[in-house]
Amino acid sequence: RRKTDIEISQGVDAINASVRRIDDLNKEISLSQSTGRSTANFEDQRREELETLAQYINIDFFTNSQGQVNVYTSNGMPLLDSNPRAMTYSPTTFVTGATVYPGGFDNIELNGLDITSTIRGGTIGGLIEMRDTILVEEQDKLNEFARVLMNDINGVLNQGASFPSPCLLYT
């Protein structure tokens, strides 16, 4: 779960880098339009960056009347409108079986709001599901298996073995 938490942090960093890149491309497109140069190359790069961003998190976007792309999370929070917005996340340094979200794991925040529970798709949504549900359930199964195995082995080892040992009783 610690590794998954680190991967969430890396994904948030990748999202922020994509949003900054899209913002830079928006500016390049505006500059090219104002000087009468072709914007096709920049628009292709922006489309590719939007596809990269969409791999990490579900997004909605539209091109405004100035040819700028505005990007929003699937629940309507702006990632890029007139300015890029950064998501924040810090991975937890120590993870135990009792570490849960919320409380033990940090919030994924956008504009100061916790959006962790609203992220459902993309790599980040999958990693959150893995960290908070799937791996917890698998750890519970493993713990139960270990408990049953321990009890069964103790039962077998204790059959016929008396305490104190019979030879100690008659000495």
Image: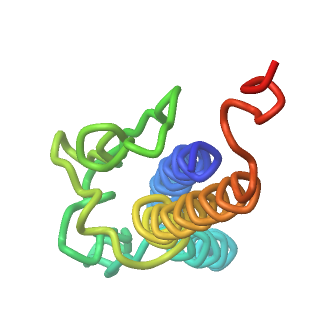
The residue that appears at 37% across and 71% down in the rendered structure is: 69
Q: Position of residue 52 (x, y in %)?
A: 61, 71
Q: Which of 106 and 45 is in front in this view?
A: 106
Q: Position of residue 10 (x, y in %)?
A: 60, 46
Q: In this view, does 25 lie above or below 3?
A: below
The residue that appears at 52% across and 65% down in the rendered structure is: 144
Q: Nearer the viewer, residue 62 or 18?
A: 18
Q: Is residue 49 above or below residue 74?
A: above
Q: Position of residue 39 (x, y in %)?
A: 59, 73
Q: Nearer the viewer, residue 137 or 13?
A: 137
In the rendered image, is residue 77 in sight? yes
Q: Is residue 77 above or below residue 50?
A: above
Residue 66, image quadrant: bottom left
Q: Which residue lies furthest to the top in this view?
A: 171
The residue that appears at 56% across and 54% down in the rendered structure is: 11
Q: Which of 153 and 76 is in front in this view?
A: 153
The reply, left or right, for residue 87 in relation to residue 21 is left
Q: Where does the C terminus fall, quadrant-wise?
A: top right
The residue that appears at 45% across and 54% down in the rendered structure is: 23
Q: How is the image coloured?
A: rainbow
Mark count: 0
